Amino acid sequence: MPRAAAPAMGMLCLLCLMHAAPSPAHAATWSKAGSTKDSRVYLDKASIRKSEAGSGDGRRAWTLESFDKPQTAPDGKQYLSVKALHLYDCAERSVTLQSQTFYPEAMARGEAVGTYKFEAFDAEQVSEGSRYTAAMKAVCGKDKARKTPAARPPAANTAP
């Protein structure tokens, strides 16, 4: 092999190795999961994982909320989108925030302006029609995410 071809072969081998190596980060595919008048909520369905937290019927999943107008993060910085890791308790129909990363542009574009992780955060009930209703249904499945029917009052005692 001529000496001039050696650097080209080395570069070709390096490119082949880079292509064959697994990517270090999961590239999220966002599916629209709900909206409000000011924002849209997306879910990364590939991020859904079972969790034993809460009632034991929990799932963790990443959401992305993209806003029409700038919002203000807890530290005062402006952002247009936020990625959040939530714990969904399918039996209790609640969602607990675990971490958030704020971005200056829509759809989590641009360099993050802040990241917050929460050790203990109160669970929120997911009421029908809220921005997380569709995400709850996608994460938990339609049957488990349905509202639990109200309990019926006991039958009147008709003893003689």
Image (tube, grey):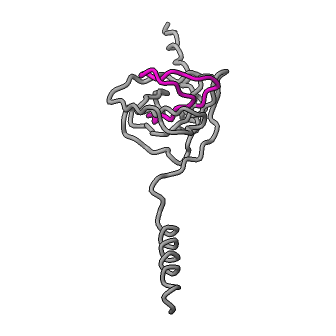
The residue positioned 36% from the left and 35% from the top of the image is: 53
Q: Is residue 2 above or below residue 63?
A: below
- What is the chief secondary structure element of the magenta stretch? strand
Which residue sits furthest left?
119
Q: Is residue 117 visible?
A: yes
Q: Is residue 88 visible?
A: no
Spot occupied by residue 102 in the image (x, y as percentages of width and height): 49, 32
Which residue sits furthest front?
4
Residue 67 included in the magenta stretch of the image: yes
Q: Is residue 12 above or below residue 45?
A: below
Based on the displayed image, in which of its 4 quarters is residue 119 positioned? top left
The residue positioned 54% from the left and 35% from the top of the image is: 144
Judge left or right: residue 17 versus residue 119. Answer: right
Instruction: Please give the count of numbered marks on the rendered protein.
Output: 0
Which residue sits furthest top?
160
Based on the displayed image, in which of its 4 quarters is residue 57 positioned? top left
Judge left or right: residue 12 versus residue 40. Answer: left
The residue positioned 43% from the left and 28% from the top of the image is: 96
Spot occupied by residue 20 in the image (x, y as percentages of width and height): 50, 69
- The foreground one among 14 and 120 is 14
The residue positioned 47% from the left and 28% from the top of the image is: 95
- Write down the region rendered in magenta: 66-89
Residue 43 included in the magenta stretch of the image: no
Which residue sits furthest right?
37
Spot occupied by residue 154 in the image (x, y as percentages of width and height): 50, 14
